[in-house]
Amino acid sequence: MMLRTLCRTGGALLQQTQRTVPRLWVTPAQQRWASSLPMNTVVLFVPQQEAWVVERMGRFHRILEPGLNFLIPLLDRIRYVQSLKEIVIDVPEQSAVSLDNVTLQIDGVLYLKILDPFKASYGVEDPEYAVTQLAQTTMRSELGKLTLDKVFRERESLNSNIVHAINQASDDWGIRCLRYEIKDIHVPPRVKESMQMQVEAERKKRATVLESEGTREAAINVAEGCKQAQILASEGEKTERINQAAGEAQAVVAKAEAKAKAIRVLSEALTEQNGNAAASLSVAEQYVSAFSKLAKESNTILLPSSTGDISGMVTQAMTIYSTLAKTSQKAAPEAVKEKSEEVVNQSSQ
């Protein structure tokens, strides 16, 4: 009978707890909702991620864990209901002055979590309102240390500094600030226009610098190309001259060898029988060929006195040849004698 009565009482209490209407825990600007305080009954069911602070005869007694719990209706009273979930608070927009005296309108989002329900209940009257005000004052203090340009560049470090400052003060409240994010930063219209002009000027400067660098690189490339072209042209001309000189030298050597061979063949032919007659015939042919070329290149002509005496000219040429041959034959033994004397002198020394 008693067990049936307890089950009926527990079911009624459960239905009554489920019918509890959520209420606004702090100010409407916070948008923070929590369950209303349940009735002080014998059997209570605490939801997950909630902590119910119980007072016995006006003094803190214990914190109810999620699940089934039992209370003494007249002595025990549920004084506070704390949510252990991560809480998101919208920080209202506020004005702050930067280091370079620019007024900014900044709002943000604050992420909190209650770590100690006892401190959150008895450490401060309204923990979320206190943290919100602390975030606003800290934001104004941190912005006063930075210029306008650094506010946009060091946004992450600004958020971390605010979180660190809030945690130092909220440790006694049992609340931990997880992170703070700046949502919007509004600057005055004139400052915004000047920033836009500065950005445009910076972009024009970059474009001008890039264009000048491109022109410089193009000029360097053209000069380098001209230099390489001149080097290659000079090397080609040098190679051409070397090849031409080598060809001329080979031509001279070939002509000399051919002439020496011709002279050698001629000398051998002259030593044979009827060599003088052959030489006379060659001289006569050259004489006739020379007379055939007269007056072709110039109007001035020098003729010998005996132009028609071909036999006399041939005889004169053969006489000169015989005289040179005899001279060379006499000079050869003398050269051999001198050479032998030099060899004897060298051996005696």
Image (tube, rainbow, N blue to C red):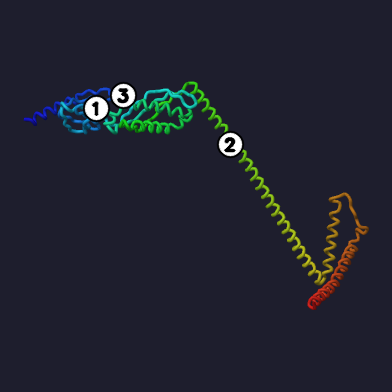
Compare residues 136 and 75 and report the one nearer the observer: 75
Q: CA distance from mark 3 to mark 2?
A: 57 Å
In the image, residue 228 sits, relative to residue 96, either above or below, namely: below
Q: Assign a secondary structure to mark 1.
A: strand
Q: Nearer the viewer, mark 3 or mark 1?
A: 1
Q: Confirm or deny contact between disc 3 and disc 1 (CB under 8 A).
A: no
Q: Assign a secondary structure to mark 2.
A: helix
* Residue at figure coordinates x 46%, y 32% from the top left: 153
Q: Quadrant of the N terminus?
A: top left
Q: Residue furthest right?
A: 305
* Residue at figure coordinates x 85%, y 71% from the top left: 331
Q: Which mark is residue 80?
A: 1
Query: Disc 2 or 1, which lies upstream in sequence?
Result: 1
Which residue is identified by label 3? 31
When asked about the image quadrant of residue 337, the answer is bottom right
The amino acid on which the numbered mark 2 sits, given as a three-letter code, is Glu
The amino acid on which the numbered mark 3 sits, given as a three-letter code, is Gln
Q: Which mark is residue 213?
A: 2
